[in-house]
Image: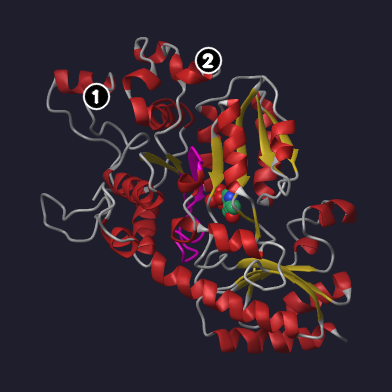
Amino acid sequence: MADEKFDFATRAIHAGAAPDPTTGARSTPIYQTTAYVFDDVDHAASLFNLQTFGYIYSRLTNPTVAVLEERIANLEGGRAAVCAASGHAAQLLAFFSIMEPGDEFVASRNLYGGSITQFMHAFRKFGWICKFVDPSDPENFRRALTDKTKAIFCEVLANPGGTIVDLEPIAAIAKAAKVPLMVDNTLATPFLCRPFDWGADIVLHSTTKFLAGHGNAMGGAVVESGRFDWFAAGGKFPSMTESDPAYHGLKFAETFGDFGYSMKTRAVGLRDLGPTMAPLNAFLTITGIETLHLRMARHVANAQAVAEFLERHPAVAWVSYAGLASSPYRALARKYMPQGPGSVFTFGVKGGYDAGVALVEGVELFSHLANVGDTRSLVIHPASTTHRQLTTEQQVAAGAGPDTIRLSVGLESADDLIRDLSQALSRTAK
Ligand SMILES: *Cc1c(COP(=O)(O)O)cnc(C)c1O
């Protein structure tokens, strides 16, 4: 299933998986094991030297997780993938493979709030410096480059506002600077957008969201295109191109070629930092992905219906959904996501903060919680929850002002969702 002769729907169900060779089990078993028996001492030695591919210990590799890795790599059109315990763990691993203390990367400022915090504060402790830029002008990424820049990072479909980043010119800027473009594709999923087709080098996922899809399994993934030339960057990436003392002087980019970055991320990142995905979570995510194409199509259709309802509603001040004719992101949505711009977006209630609180307390079918990408419809008022530590000015800059509500539209009946929002909106006027 490594090639792409099958359509997306077929690959979503089959890629990376085969009946279990010993039992014939048709669905991928949960290999709930910590370790794997060696054939003999020579076999063990070659596994430890990375000369043979196989299983040693589940911090590094596990057969259930391996099926998920191959499936995600296949759906993204990538060369290889490494899964991690969460989306944040995947981001940590992705940067750990290429960054040295004092290095910088440039990131879009339109990101999931947790990523902004991770980049701004936690990464500082490793000596990694993130420069945030407004992604609406791609040239802003070029302006922030220095000789210490090691990557450009963005979300193609950005949380929370459902805004879209123009990947193609940003990929050209990254290419000219000889640094990889990393794209968080969590909200779009490979069903709606494949960043590798637009020049990205590394794709990241919080599989916790739409890939697992049912709000029941944490996970993350780092996917590499296999096209980035680490040697051509002229010594910028010593961890890829220079001898690794922990592996007898092996050079990852030389020995493993177009999957050297994945090998580095696994054999050093996962080995030494340890944020491994649990086999049960891999199983749930594999199962989730089998219906990804059906779910995403329905998520998008429901989001479109809900957004159109909200735009017509007199208690609603504005709606930020790139599928609306009124959206400034409509053209970018058509280019990068012709099947629709996902199902996470924001809108504003008339009456500001108090109206926002009344809405989240008034809904009955929508769940008031901090997550996206569930079968269930979800709602949050960022100013009173995820963004409450920020000043009003900072909230507005993050697209989460006092009147802002974020929805993750699920898979229920659109009519029921609209009825629920309608009754909750009637309470915001009081
Ligand atoms: C949730 C999320 C993350 C972080 O993923 P976790 O699995 O929660 O660690 C990163 N990026 C985006 C866009 C997200 O929605």
The residue tagged with tag 1: helix, strand or loop? helix
Q: Amino acid at mark 2?
A: Gly
Q: Is residue 79 left or right of residue 229?
A: left
Residue on which disc 1 sits: 47
- Please name the predominant secondary structure of the magenta segment in the image: loop
Q: Which residues are magenta?
A: 199-221
From the top left corner, tell me how far across and down residue 124 is, in percent: 70, 29
Please tell me the numbered disc located at residue 234.
2
Q: Amino acid at mark 1?
A: Leu
Q: Nearer the viewer, residue 178 or 19?
A: 178
Q: Is residue 294 above or below residue 189?
A: below
Please say if the residues under marks 1 and 2 sit with CB atoms less than 8 Å apart: no
Residue at the image point whose x is 56% and y is 18% from the top: 236
Q: Is residue 15 above or below residue 137?
A: below
From the top left corner, tell me how far across and down residue 258 is, in percent: 36, 30
Query: Is the residue marked by circle 2 packed among few (<14), some (14-19), or many (20+) residues within 10 Å?
Result: few
On whether ligand 1 comes within 8 Å of the CB at mark 1, the answer is: no
Q: Quadrant of residue 53?
A: top left
Residue at the image point whose x is 59% and y is 20% from the top: 100
Which quadrant, please, contains the C terminus?
A: bottom right
Q: Is residue 6 above or below residue 236?
A: below
- Disc 1 to disc 2, how far (Cα)? 31 Å
The residue tagged with tag 2: helix, strand or loop? loop
From the top left corner, tell me how far across and down residue 299 is, in percent: 52, 72
Looking at the image, can residue 371 be seen?
A: no
From the top left corner, tell me how far across and down residue 130 is, in percent: 70, 33
Q: Is residue 131 left or right of residue 69?
A: right
Q: Nearer the viewer, mark 1 or mark 2?
A: 2
Looking at the image, can residue 106 be seen?
A: yes
